[in-house]
């Protein structure tokens, strides 16, 4: 019986080395390479296809851009960021894993394999999807304890179609939603990155002029750009190009990974920055204070699950139920200004706006029949417990009874002592 394994294949050093290892070390007769399109540059697909052909590898390319874009828009409804940056790589991995699993099932593969190391997050994001199937999961780089130096030597010995393992100084991962750059000198937190690590964004200080962009939302989902209906993939691509010209969407951070490692990461995410900024601005208009306060908890939990690759977890399904109900009101438009690396909301409009211009105006005497003088009683009670607590603490420190003094101050606050 022929044993077949589906491999997440990029054509880079790690996954190229995995092909012969899966045959030699794991006994698989056939390896099926699967490359999933979530918005990578065209040259990455060229590399994968050329490498697969040189390896005589059965190879499939799956277009999952729309599926990924829709998941990114789900994250917008949850204002999903992890430690301050939009989730890009994290959200792409479950989409990629699901696509590879489908190919594996269609081609009767017995196992699934990836080229992740044992130090990163991606191994967990892939495997949380795959381990729900009945197929074996294999991670050669992790299980065999491979180093990059060993892989380069092995590739040279086997005459594998890689350029000596030289893929550039930086480790770069690109998809529709974000571009991440790490490795080499960037691993030093004191190292100031050169401008050439960036590709999507102009140097903020060099970005000239400014531009107003209007984003339209329906039930929390972005649907229009400057009044024109645009599909999810095109909307993201257009905003990446537009906002990137103004240097919008850079993050340089120390990130805490799931396994406890702290790493230095650099990200570019122009479209994500614009959409998240605009969405949150619209929520500020249509939500009550209580809704806004509670929504922060929903957002944080969604983002934590998204970072872990658990977008299909029972918790996320429950959170989505709340989002479906609450986001009905997040319908309207937001205008943001792009300028000098910044994106900020400058106008908002929605029929659901919990806002009254006349009530907020300094030129209006009453609010819904409430006189300004009616606030006097509220002002007297506001902070009363805190003032009382401070007096009690002071009396304890000084050893004074303070009962009569408290009664006098209570009267001064507008109240009367209670008779027992």
Image (cartoon, grey):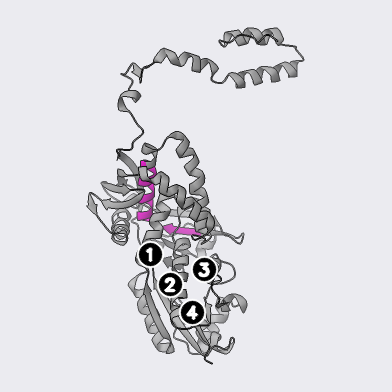
Report x, y in % for residue 114. 52, 75
What's the distance in space between the residues labelled 4 and 1, CA to CA? 21 Å
The secondary structure that dominates the magenta segment is: helix
Sequence order check: which comes first, mark 2 or mark 3?
A: 2
Segment colored magenta: 265-282
What's the distance in space between the residues labelled 1 and 3, CA to CA? 16 Å
Mark 4 or 2: in front is: 2
Q: Is residue 271 magenta?
A: yes
Q: Is residue 263 left or right of residue 197?
A: right
Report x, y in % for residue 252. 47, 54
Query: What kind of element bears circle 2?
Result: helix
Sequence order check: which comes first, mark 1 or mark 3?
A: 1
Crowd band around label 4 with a 10 angstrom C-alpha radius: few (<14), some (14–19), many (20+): many
Crowd band around label 1 with a 10 angstrom C-alpha radius: few (<14), some (14–19), many (20+): some
Residue under label 2: 99
Q: Residue at x 55, y 78 (%)?
A: 135
Pick whichever, 147 or 414, lies toward us.
414
Q: Residue at x 37, y 83 (%)?
A: 50
Indicate which disc residue 7 carries.
4
What's the distance in space between the residues labelled 4 and 2, CA to CA? 11 Å
Sequence order check: which comes first, mark 4 or mark 1?
A: 4
What's the distance in space between the residues labelled 2 and 3, CA to CA? 10 Å
Pick whichever, 319 or 262, lies toward us.
319
Q: Is residue 59 left or right of residue 234?
A: right
Q: Residue at x 52, y 78 (%)?
A: 112
Tell me, yes or no, whether the two marked residues, 1 and 2, touch with CB atoms within 8 Å. Answer: yes
Give above or below for 8 relative to 412.
Answer: below
Residue under label 1: 67
Q: Is residue 260 magenta?
A: no
Indicate which disc residue 129 carries.
3
């Amino acid at each position: 019986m022929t044993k077949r394994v589906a491999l997440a294949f990029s054509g880079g050093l790690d996954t190229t080395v995995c092909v012969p290892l899966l045959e030699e070390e794991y006994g698989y007769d056939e390896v099926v390479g699967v490359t999933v399109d979530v918005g990578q540059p065209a040259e990455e697909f060229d590399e994968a296809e050329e490498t697969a052909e040189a390896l005589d590898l059965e190879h499939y390319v799956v277009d999952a851009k729309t599926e990924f874009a829709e998941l990114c828009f789900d994250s917008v409804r949850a204002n999903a960021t992890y430690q301050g940056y939009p989730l890009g790589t994290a959200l792409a991995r479950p989409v990629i894993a699901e696509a590879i699993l489908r190919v594996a099932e269609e081609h009767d593969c017995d196992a699934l394999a990836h080229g992740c190391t044992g130090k990163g997050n991606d191994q967990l994001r892939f495997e949380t999807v795959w381990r729900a199937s009945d197929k074996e999961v294999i991670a050669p780089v992790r299980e065999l304890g491979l180093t990059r130096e060993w892989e380069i030597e092995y590739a040279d010995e086997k005459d594998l179609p890689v350029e000596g393992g030289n893929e550039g100084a930086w480790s770069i991962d690109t998809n529709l939603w974000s571009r991440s750059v790490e490795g080499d000198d960037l691993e030093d937190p004191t190292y100031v990155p050169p401008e050439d690590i960036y590709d999507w964004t102009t140097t903020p200080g060099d970005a000239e002029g400014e531009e107003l962009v209007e984003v339209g939302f329906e039930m929390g989902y972005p649907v229009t750009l400057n009044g024109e209906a645009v599909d999810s993939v095109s909307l993201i691509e257009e905003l990446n190009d537009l906002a990137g010209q103004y240097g919008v969407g850079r993050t340089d951070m120390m990130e805490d990974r799931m396994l406890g490692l702290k790493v230095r990461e650099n990200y570019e995410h122009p479209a994500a920055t614009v959409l998240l900024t605009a969405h949150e601005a619209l929520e500020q208009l249509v939500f009550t204070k209580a809704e806004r306060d509670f929504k922060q908890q929903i957002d944080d939990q969604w983002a934590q699950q998204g970072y872990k690759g658990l977008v299909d977890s029972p918790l996320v399904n429950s959170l989505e139920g709340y989002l479906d109900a609450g986001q009905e009101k997040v319908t309207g438009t937001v205008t943001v200004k792009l300028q000098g690396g910044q994106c900020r909301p400058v106008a908002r409009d929605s029929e659901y706006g919990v806002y009254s211009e006349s009530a907020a105006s300094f030129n209006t005497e009453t609010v819904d029949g409430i006189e300004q003088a009616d606030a006097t009683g509220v002002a007297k009670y506001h902070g009363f417990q805190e003032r009382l607590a401070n007096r009690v603490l002071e009396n304890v420190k000084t050893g004074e009874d303070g009962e009569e003094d408290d009664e006098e101050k209570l009267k001064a606050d507008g109240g009367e002592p209670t008779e027992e």
